[in-house]
Image (spheres, grey):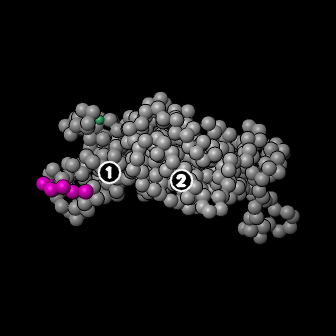
Amino acid sequence: MSAAPSRWSQLSPSGRRVALEVLVHGPLARTELAQRLDLSTPSLTRLTRPLIDLGVLREVDDAVEQTSRPGGRPPQPLDVDPGLDHFIGVKLTGSHAYAVLTDLRAQIVRSAEVEVDDHRPAAVVALLAGLVAQIRGQRPAPVAAIGVGLGGIVHEGFRVGRAPFLGWRDVPLGDLLRVATGLPVVLANDLDALMEAEHWFGAGRDVSDFVALTIGAAVGCGLVVHDRLVHGGDSGLGLLGHFPIDPLGPACPDGHRGCANALLSMDSIQAQASLAIGRPLTYDEVLDLALAADPIADQVVGNAARGFGVLIADVVNIAQPQRVVLTGEGIRLAEVGWDRLVASIRAHRNPEASEVDLHLVKDDPMLWARGAAAVAIQRTVLDTLP
Ligand SMILES: [Zn+2]
């Protein structure tokens, strides 16, 4: 049941650089690949030969180039076979576990989900092991590694330091799940995992600096600078959620008046509108009412959208990303309040500053599970599994 020794562990550091470049940006013509890595053609040829022998890289046909070049053997672009390895990504929440089986480029092959009733670690491990078996199917597909993403703080990729939604502190979930499944397991904070997936395989693939802002139970922020995810000991605490936006706004549970969570979390928007309108409303009902031009809902949503614009502008002014990805369970706020959001970003930037490149990514639990799979992919190909 355990995975075969990884072909990725046999790569030299420079061979790995070549493989990663092709994995993330391929297929690539050899000339372009050499240019991207600042290598001479002979060096590149020397590095790619063992990768082709190992099956990590393959030559692919490029029909367009072939027909446009009379005579001679056209240079064949290099690519990675995405079906070379498979991975499982799991997003664990207090109520559900969502799992995806992906290929080497984090494309989802199939997905499954299960309810989480019992938060005791042994019960969660048994549940996840069952989910892993289910998604592998009756004829277990070879799986290189499992990634698990959850809200909270994760240490060294295998230990949950703190996961409030499960009531956990210091649970070696990675070790427990590795023993239960016989597969390598890596844990990550769920937003970090989502960032890594966007960085290698998504909206951040073609830029070196980008930010993701999420709206859900709280406001989250992830930052990739110079192609590296910004990560510190407090990553997973949701630090940006307490960014001050409106000194006269409502207070968050930690007592900050008008912080991002107090203004923009789904609960807060729902509570503000329910109180003002005088009946209990769901988050989506508030947004629907705003769309239907209900003046009170529209005011609450408009204030939140403008507040979100302030937050985005401040983050962009500080970090200067090339792109901003907006997602999360409550990101419909940005859709409904789009015009006010964009106007507010503009109003809080230097008038000469460039337009912010905003990407709205529709939220889906499987997107977060895919993030966890992406971390398993990264740790496998970089040969840094815990
Ligand atoms: Zn706060």
* Amino acid type of the residue that numbered disc 1 sits on in the rendered structure: Leu
Left or right position of 216 against 379: left
What residue is pinned by disc 2?
A: 130
Residue 225 pos. (x, y %): 52, 38
The residue identified by callout 1 is: 341
Residue at screen point 60% across, 61% down: 137
**Is residue 205 at least partly visible in the picture?**
no
- Nearer-N-terminus badge (1/2): 2
Question: Is 309 or 266 nearer to us in this picture?
Answer: 266
Q: Residue 16 carries which label?
A: none
Determine which quarter of the picture holds residue 382: top right
Q: Seen from this angle, which residue lies furthest right?
A: 72
Q: Can residue 71 be seen in this view?
A: yes
The rendered magenta stretch, by its main secondary structure, is classed as: loop
Identity of the residue drawn at 60% across and 47% down = 181
Report whether 176 appears left or right of 249. Answer: right
State yes or no: residue 329 in magenta: no
- Secondary structure under badge 1? helix
Residue 312: image quadrant is top left
* Residue drawn at 21 percent across, 57 percent down: 281
State the residue lying farthest toward the left: 278
Give amino acid for label 2: Gly
Local crowd at mark 2 within 10 Å, few (<14), some, or many (≥20)?
A: some
Q: Residues within 10 Å of mark 1 (few under 14, many from 20)?
A: many
Q: In this view, does 122 lie above or below 66?
A: above
| Residue 234 horizontal/vertical position (percent) | 44, 31
In front: label 1 or label 2: 2
Disc 2: residue Cβ within 8 A of ligand 1's nearest atom: no
